[in-house]
Amino acid sequence: MTARQDSTAGQIDPVVCTCVDLTEGQLRAEIAENPALGFDDILQRTGAGTTCTACLLDLEYIFSRAERGPAAGVHGRGGGAKAEAAHLGVKQRLYALIDGLAPKVPYRLANTLPVLALPGLRQFVCVANDSLLYRGAESAPPTRVELRVRDANGILRHRASHRVESGDGLRVEVGRFVTPHDPTDPARPAIGSVEILRRAAHPGIRGTTRPQIVIEAKAGCCAVHGQAAHVTAAPYWFTFLHRPAEERCFVSVVNVSGGTLRGRVRYPLGIEGRTPEDHPIEVPANGAHLHELHFDPESVQSDRPISLNIHFDGLHKAHFLCASPSLDRFSIDHL
């Protein structure tokens, strides 16, 4: 989390959405000035939580407890249960309804992420259980974290269970369980996957337990947070700069199902006079695939934005990776 210094008050105002550079103070002021707006309306008004979505839980936590102005009516303080319900977003109101009808029980959260294997490269899974906004007030309950590491063919290579106490954290090197296809050839990394399953010891809040992977290469380090796998009815898009002299680009796909996953990566899009090509991909059950992007240098100019789209027929998670030509630096983002 980043923060901004308030020069007048001398206080630190934490940034709660880095995508739009929105601070907690600005969010609370927006809520106070517009007390009749619901959570989704505030998101639309500020733009917060609509890009990478990593901050949504923090935003909703702040929104549900923020002070409202006197014009709030039933939405303001003193309205009892109706006022409290009015502060919540649609999703939180649905959760409150379900909680009122059934006993609270912890449920399992699942994320699946790619694992790279390459000489000189290390990859870790990190799960923190810090207090919300790092203020020491509320953490998730002690949480059981199960890791299942598989190779490209979906074969289970490692399985372990860990308990992460409130205020503690977990860091496990998972890349060592995926053996490179040819350790003597540094031209291409091997691919596998890690499934991260979380279940709290008792009902509580999720807190900061969303897992991350960290990739440590010889000359740099990168990380990305986990997301749930999905099935997309239509292709989804990604745009990036084509800089072949400076980087190599990859798309990783993890199959989060017990059946064969089929689909394709289509590129380059957005280039006049250039017909995009389909690159079929088939991934075995619970397996993973790493596709390196290749372009005809005569038809695709350097230092220009180009697009690709991806479409698969089953439950999966895809990521885009950039690496230096020598593979001593990586960056990664989810698609």
Image (tube, helix red, strand yellow):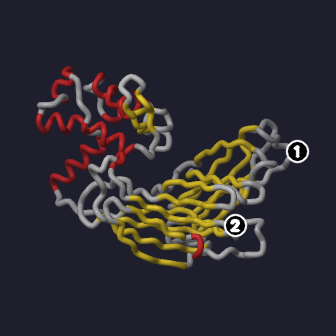
> Closer to the camera, 157 or 273?
157
From the top left corner, tell me how far across and down residue 71 is, in percent.
20, 20
Who's the residue at 74% across and 46% down the image? 268
Vertical position of residue 123 compared to residue 73: above or below: below
Q: Would you name the residue on which mark 2 appears?
A: 189
Secondary structure at badge 1 equals loop
Who's the residue at 69% across and 57% down the image? 219
Who's the residue at 39% across and 43% down the image? 56
Distance from disc 2 to disc 1, alpha carbons, whole Å, reads: 27 Å
Q: Quadrant of residue 169?
A: bottom left
Q: Would you name the residue on which mark 1 appears?
A: 298
From the top left corner, tell me how far across and down residue 118 is, in percent.
68, 69
From the top left corner, tell me how far across and down residue 59 is, in percent.
36, 40
The three-letter code of the residue at mark 2 reads Pro
Mark 1 crowdedness (10 Å alpha carbons): few <14, some 14-19, many ≥20? few
The three-letter code of the residue at mark 1 reads Glu
Who's the residue at 36% across and 55% down the image? 130
Vertical position of residue 297 compared to residue 204: above or below: above
> Closer to the camera, 91 or 218?
218
Vertical position of residue 276 compared to residue 106: above or below: above
| Eye-nearest disc, 2 or 1 | 2
Secondary structure at badge 2 equals loop
Q: Quadrant of residue 109?
A: bottom left
Identify the mark nearer the N-term, 2 or 1. Answer: 2
In the picture, the quarter occupied by the N terminus is: top left
Vertical position of residue 215 compared to residue 132: above or below: below
